[in-house]
Each structure stands twice: as structure tokens, then as C-alpha cells.
Amino acid sequence: MKRFKSTLSLVMIIMLMVGLMAGCSQPSVEVPAEETQPTSEGEAVEAEPVEEEPIEMVELNYYSHPDEKGERNAMILAFEEQYPNVKVNLVELPTDTSKKLTMLSTVLQAEDPSLDIFDADVIWPPIFASAGWVEPIDDYLTSEEIDAYLPGAILSNEYKGHYYGIPYRTDTGMLYYRKDLLEKYDKPVPTTWDELTETAKYIIEEEGGNMSGHAGSWKQYEGLTCNLTEFIWSYGGRVLDDDGNVALNSSEAIAAVTRMTDMINKDNITPEGVITFGSGDARAVFFAGEMVFLRDWPSGWNKSQNPENSKIVGKVGIAALPTGGEGQTSYSTLGGWQIMVSAFSEHKEEAIAFAKFRAGEYSQILMAKELSHIPSLKSLYSNPEVLEAMPFLESMYPAIIHAYPRPKSPYYAELSNILQVETQLAFIKQKTPEEAVKDATMQIKVLLGQ
Amino acid sequence: MASSSMRWNMKKIKEKEKMGYIFLIPAAVLISVFVIYPVINTIYLSFFNLRIQTLTEGAKFIGIDNFKKILSDQQFKTSLGFTLKFTIIAVFLETIIGMIFALIMDRAIRFQGFIRAAVLVPWAIPTIVSGLMWQFMYSPQYGIINAIFIKLQFIKDAIPWLTDAYWATTATIIADVWKTTPYMSLLILAGLQTIPKQLNDAASIDGANKVQSFFFITLPLLKPVLTVAILFRVLATFRIYDLVAVLTNGGPANQTASLSLYTINTYFNFGNIGYGAALATMTFLISLLISFLFLNTLRSKLEGAE
């Protein structure tokens, strides 16, 4: 027994060591051929001959989305070749956007200099700027550089007259649909939500099996607010009016929320558990071939055409989101991510240089090809490489450039949470859509002091 | 002669005491820096109106206004209700099941050591990892639990594990009990080992059956261990955060938002520092209340039984 125990311990120690060694090996990263790629300033990227005297290394910590296929590390390597004295560490943020906000708030509240640059969602700049946690970068951007970006994208970074970040990608909600199914049943691409529901119901009837009709990311997080505001705007409603007053309690907003809850509870065109779906979950159902329509960001395109992830390669179409009815306009939520510099960073010059690189042409083209991130630089919409990666960009350009921003406020996180909770209460039938909209309005008014 | 050696012994004891106090200093420093200071700071902040959005304006003293707001906060009531329900049911289940496991493990059977180690596996897996595992199992799309139940014809339609408030609570309780029962059972096992075998032997000679010897011998002798274990588990479960965050993130509609989750969201996501501190203080006070009540009733039961 004693010998058995010591043999067992030895085996477990060996397994532990093997596991540790495997975990420590770096994944191989493919650096795309960038010797021939000019940067936006037109300089060659070849590294200058390194001098023999020791360079003082500056280390930056970049709190970023996790690396998916090695592309972010490739981008960092390209930056480090241009700036040999800077080393950038990628620190992974959680996948859930709300948890990213929690993590960033925790570090910034502590005024910790170990965070230099970070990814920020399009609605965060007012939050961080009002708290004094981010560095204004007006002095580092020329007016041409500012103009080079899409107006909606760069304006999201503006707060009280100063710019606090640079957008490196923009985003806008789109309707994905199964071209093959619509053709099979001779149905047009729907232009109203009612039409979408009817078409979905018909196809579900005919196809049978596990087919469902439509989903978005409707779980209790920021994604739900993006979907919700698209519905509200497409029915002609508003959350805040142009003067910043709460204008949510309207028949249009109620109609929009009713449309969403009916999809779940009355028309039954949503898959089981849709109220726990993040965008990944909704995509999974669509890519498995079990859904007719999907509301998603453009970043789903790339994955939908990859046979490793998707069973519907070549069967996907993209269109603008439906409207609430005749005479209404289609709206998509302005999404996107910016790069911001912490006010407590000890290497602000280098951090800003990295920020400009991250939001510059080289990075945007790389991410457009690898991850179908849509660019925030106007010039890239006529770039042949980008258009080859995402052919729908040309037809969707009007929708992209008119993407509508969510309410801008330093209290946005709490405002969004109120919308999420009230909408979910309507989803689970604890409140009617009227009650949910009314309660949300009241709470937001209290929050904003109106 | 006796008095001088006594004096010499006293001196030795005093020196040993001094050494003891010196060894305590590092731990005392750590506790005051990482526990006492933050707790006092949080309680202090709860009397102010402070948000990150108005950080530059500074904190405004508002006395107990934050606490008044808590009493009329619907979300606080929902979270408190959920957390209490969760704590009571989970601790009850883990005590009963833990007791059964402990009684089984107490028997000298083959591979006793291996079984005791294997039983600890759920406890050893990090909560985030096991939480994600449970999330997959509960999934309405490809969850294995629904698939098995439907195949065995226990149910007809899939159970909405994480989408319905009632089922989400149940699902979280199951995941928590799975994780913490081993810990409870090992604590109880340790207690069982201190009970002399002769007592049970004497009882069986006198004609007591297994059930009687359990209730009249084992259980009373286990009371001290059980009290400590249950109190410890109640306080820990009351603070539940990571499991809820991974499984439901408080959803649907904040119905499964534990007090800790609500507090952390308020403090870090919404940036409402004053109100978040008040919520944390309130949670702390409620935990204190629970532990006092608990210790009092159990102590009287202990004294009453003897």
C-alpha cells in the first residue's frame, strides 16, 4: 500500500509538471507579411538597425479584448518594431462587456499606474472622463487626423469639449438572414419587424425540426440595451430627446417592447433561453443552421463564412434592420471600440503613440481582414483589401455612417441597467410592456435628476 | 528555594509571552491593513453621497440618507430575499447530505483514503470553472441535464434552468450544494472521529438500534462541530458572488442578484461609491445579526439538551 501511494504521488507530480510546461509554451502567432505595408504616414516599417547601447525600455500594459487568433499580438509586434524601446503587454479583459467595465473601474478607481491603455466601449468615454480617469488627447491629434475618422465614431470620444480616446473600430447592428431559406420559400428580405415575424413563423412551420426564427443578444447586459434601442428607434421612439430630457414613455416605445416580448411569448419565434443569450449564444444557433434571422454585429460575418464555426457558409445575407412599420426609418445602434489612455499612466507619450497606432490604418486593415471589424477611418471604405474581406461594406455604408448613438451620459451604466432589468421583467411577464416602459422612465428621471 | 525557582519560572513564562506577542505582529498588521482598514473605510463612506461621475466635486456628507434609501429600494429587497432563501436552503441541504456522506466515510472500508480525497474534488475545482461547467449542462440548447431527463421521460419539455427566476434559483442552489457538501462532510467526519467507539458499542449492547444511537449519542456529541460548521457556511453562503455571476449574472431581470452582486455592480459598474458602501455595510450588519441569532439559539439548544 505504501509503495502504491508513493507511485501514485510520483505519477501525479509528473502529470502536474507536464501540464505546467504545456501551459507555459507560447501559441504560435502568424505575423502577416508587413514588410511591404506602408503605415499611414508612409514610412517603411522595416526596423532600423538596433544600436548597441542599451535602450531604456518602456513597458506598457494594454488592457484589451482577449486575442482570438493571434492577430492582436501580431499588431503589437508590428508596433514594437516601429518603436523598439517600447514593450506592450496585452492584459486580457473578461469577455462580458459589463465585466470589462467592472474590471477597468476597479483598476482606475485605485489610480493604479499599471494600466496604461485600454479598450473602451463606445458609451464609456463620458463615464471615465467625468471621473477624471482618462487623459485628454486633443494636443496629440491634428484636425486632419480627427476628420479622417467617421463622425459618429470620433464624436463618441468627445466629452465637454475634449477628446479622450480614438476609435479603432466602429460597429452597427445588422440583420443577418438565410438567403437559401428565403429563396426556397420565395420570401423577400423583410423591411418591417412584423414582416420578419410572419416570414419566420412561416419558415418554422415548413421546415420543422429545431428551426427558430430570430434572436439577438437579449440577456441582461449591454447587448440587450443595443438591441432594445434599435427596436425603440425603429418604431419612432426615443430614450432621451435632443435636450437630454427623458422621452422614453411613449406609445412608440411601448409598441417596440411589445414587439420584442411577443416574439418570445406570443409568436414563439425565438429559441429557448433567448433571454440568457450573449451575442455568442445567438450566433451559435444561427451558425448551426437552426435560425432564419439574426441580429448581430458585423464581426459575425467572418465567422459565418468559416467552415470550422459555421454550417451555413455561403448561405448568409446581410441587410439593414427592419423598421416598426410604414414610414419609419431603420436604425442601428452605434457600437464600436476606442482606445483610451489612463490619466495615471507613467508613460503617457508612449501610450498615446500606441493608441494612435492601434487606431491607425495598419491595425484597422489587419482586424478587418482577420476579424471583420469594420473600420472607423473613412478612407478604408474604398480600400480593396477591406472590401474583399467584407463585401457588404459597400451596400451597408449608408447604415454604418448613420448609426445612431445610445444616450450619452456619465450615468450611462446605471441608465442602461434600468433599461435591461425592466425589459427583462417584461420578457418574463412579470410586468406588461406599458408598466416596464413607465417604470424605466421614472427610474431614469430620478437617476438624471429630472 | 521553592519560591526562587517559582520566580525563575514566572520570568521564563513572561519571556515566552513576549515572544508570542512579537510573532503575532505580522498577522495583526496584515489583518489591520487588509481587513480592518477597508471595513472602517467602507462604513465611513456609507455616510456620504459620492459617485465617480461627481468625483471632482468631492464627497457630500448626508448622514443616514443612504440607509433610508436602502429600506425603500425594491432591488435591495429582491436581492435580500433571494440571498436569504439561497443561504437557508443551500446550507440545510449541504448539512444533511454532508452528514450522510460523513457517516458513510466513517466506516473503515477499503480505499478509505482514496474516497476521502476523491470526495473533495468538487470543492477543489475553482468556482468559475465549475460554474461554467454547470452553465453548459443547464443550457436550453445543448444542455445534458435536459437531454437526459427527456430521454428518461421524467419531463416532457425542457426545464428553463437559467431563464426562469424559480428554476434559476434552484439551479444555483444545486451547483452550490454540489461544490460545498464535500467540505461540510469532511468537517463533520472530523467531528465523528472524536466520538469514542465505546459509546456506540455500549448503546448497542443495551439494545439501541442504529437510528437511536445516531440521534441520542452521535448527534448530541457532534453539536459543537456542527454549530461551527453551519455558522461558517451560513456566513460564507450569504456572501455568494462568483457562482451567481457566472451562472446567471443576476438574471433574469435581477431576480437572482445576490446582495454581493448587487453591491459590486452598484459600486464598480455604476460608480455609486456612497450607496455601494452603504449596501456593503448593510450586508455586514445583517450577517452579524444572523450569526448572533444563530449562536444564541444553538447555544440554548445545547444547554437545554444537556
Image (cartoon, coloured by chain):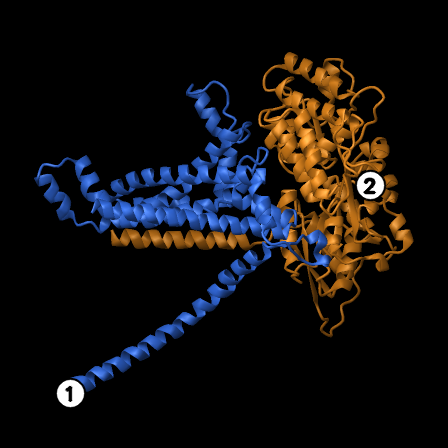
Chain colours: A orange, B blue
- Please, what secondary structure does the residue beneath circle 1 have? loop
Task: Say whether residue A228 is left or right of residue B7.
Answer: right
Task: Say whether residue B185 is left or right of residue A272.
Answer: left
Q: In the image shown, does A88 or B256 lie closer to the viewer?
A: B256
Give the class, few, some or many, for how many residues have Cα within 10 Å of label 1's Cα (few <14, many ≥20).
few
User: Which amino acid type is shown beneath numbered disc 1?
Assistant: Met
Q: Which residue is mark 2?
A: A385
From this view, report whether residue B2 is shown above or below residue B268: below
Q: Quadrant of the N terminus of chain B?
A: bottom left
The chain carrying label 2 is A
Name the spot of residue A351 as percent of width and height, x first. Answer: 75, 60
Residue at position x 44%, y 23% in the image: B149
Residue at position x 66%, y 39% in the image: A417
Name the spot of residue A425 as percent of width and height, x first. Answer: 61, 29
Name the spot of residue A310 as percent of width and height, x first. Answer: 65, 30
User: Which amino acid type is shown beneath numbered disc 2?
Assistant: Glu
Name the spot of residue A237 as percent of width and height, x first. Answer: 78, 29
- Please, what secondary structure does the residue beneath circle 2 have? helix
One can see residue A308 in this view = no
The reply to whether label 1 and label 2 mark residues of one chain is: no
- Work out how far the residue at label 1 is from the one at label 2, CA to CA, in angstroms: 101 Å
Give the class, few, some or many, for how many residues have Cα within 10 Å of label 2's Cα (few <14, many ≥20).
some
From this view, report whether residue A265 is shown above or below residue B20: above
User: Which mark identifies residue A227?
Assistant: none
